[in-house]
Amino acid sequence: MKLSVLINEGPYTHQASDSAFQFTKAALDKGHEIFRVFFYHDGVNNATRLTTPPQDDRNIVNRWSKLAEEHKLDLVVCVAAAQRRGIVDDGEAKRNGKDATNLAPGFRISGLGQLIEAGIQSDRLVTFGD
Amino acid sequence: MLHIVNKSPLDRPSLDAVLQTGEAGAILLIEDGVYAATKGSAGEAKLKNAAGKFKLYALAPDLEARGVADRVMDGVTAVDYAGFVDLVAENKTCQSWL
Amino acid sequence: MTTKKFMFVNRKAPYGTVYALESLEVVLIAAAFEQDVSLAFMDDGVYQLKKGHNTKGIEMKGFEKTYGALEDYDVTKLYVDQESLAARGLSADDLCVPVEVMPRAALGKMMEEQDTVLSF
């Protein structure tokens, strides 16, 4: 089955990203296809490479980057939500005159159309939020 | 439909919303939503009433994390993340009641 | 392009959190993708439609007008939970756009008919 996941909250403050990660991993282990993981609202904060969580706790951002690399996942960060919250890649930095970028590996910034497309193309879309 | 509830019933009206709105299907309690399935809680009575209409599930890792896996009410089946995936696949659609 | 039935469920009040505003943005994109879009308003979500938002004092962007603009995008299926309105002392006359008010059970039936239900 083709599954997509929507994550509405940032790392650590809510369990949403954790639950979504465990769900995504379990789905992959069962042989399902993850069409897309879409990050919206504060969910875009899962895509900053500048976090330094405590050593003895999970590294939420790196975990997503690693899973994306292992399984060629499409992790998409909503551009409008990212602009509001300061998640920036090279393209956005140039376009909006920012002097830094912070997008973590494995993520890409794109429009809300990618979420709608995920809803259209997937058999199921599961939302994790507050 | 699979209804996913992630908030505790005394914190948010999400469980009430599902129970009053949802048609037959399944309810999966995850994150803080698992508290609704604990014996002696306000959630237990509500879920008991709903047991005829909905199949009831709670995510085992979330029960264990919160130290309440030993007091899950009768009629609620504990599932792991693989079981969560199966529930999503088995139901035509899913809705998260945030 | 495939057309699917997308329902957007709104259960949170406006301005206290961002969900009302940002979910509207998704609705507009879904409409642009020519999907079969409907919106459900329940619990505090009904407050989003209350007429007369005046956000000058809180210096936040008001978005009441956007609900009125949905019609231009062919988004006309707005369903409001009767019980939620009543519990908040509201009626359809208090709302900024025409809606279909219905009991919870009827709303539940509508939800079952959807291909994809999005919550924010």
Image (tube, coloured by chain):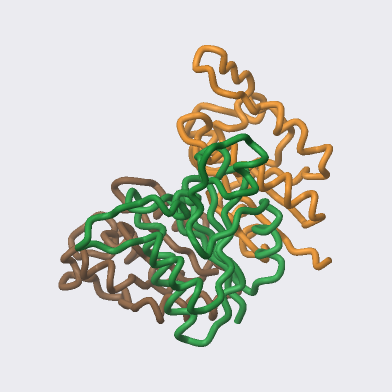
Chain colours: A green, B brown, C orange
**Depth check, front residue: C71 or C87:** C71
Number of numbered labels in the structure image = 0
In the rendering, at what x and y percent does residue C114 appear?
67, 63
Q: Position of residue B56 (x, y in %)?
A: 38, 72
Which residue is located at x 81 percent, y 38 percent?
Answer: C71
Is A128 or A62 nearer to us in this picture? A62
The x and y percentages for residue A120 are: 71, 66
Q: Residue at x 42, y 74 (%)?
A: B55
Q: In what quadrant of the picture does the N terminus of chain C appear?
A: bottom right
Q: Which image quarter: residue C61?
A: top right
Q: Is residue A12 above or below residue C47?
A: below
Which residue sits at x=56%, y=50%? C104
**The quadrant where residue B5 appears:** bottom left
In the image, is residue B44 above or below residue B89?
above
Q: Which residue is rendered at x = 42% and y = 50% of the image?
A: A10
Q: Residue furthest front?
A: A99
Point out residue B51 in the picture as x, y percentages from the top left corner.
Answer: 38, 70
Nearer to me, C7 or C109: C7
Q: Residue furthest top?
A: C57
Location of residue C60 by image quarter: top right
**Horizontal arrangement in the rendering, residue B69 relative to residue B55 (left or right):** left
**On screen, A13 above or below C17?**
below
Q: Is residue A98 left or right of residue C37?
A: left
User: Does A70 appear above or below C43?
Assistant: below
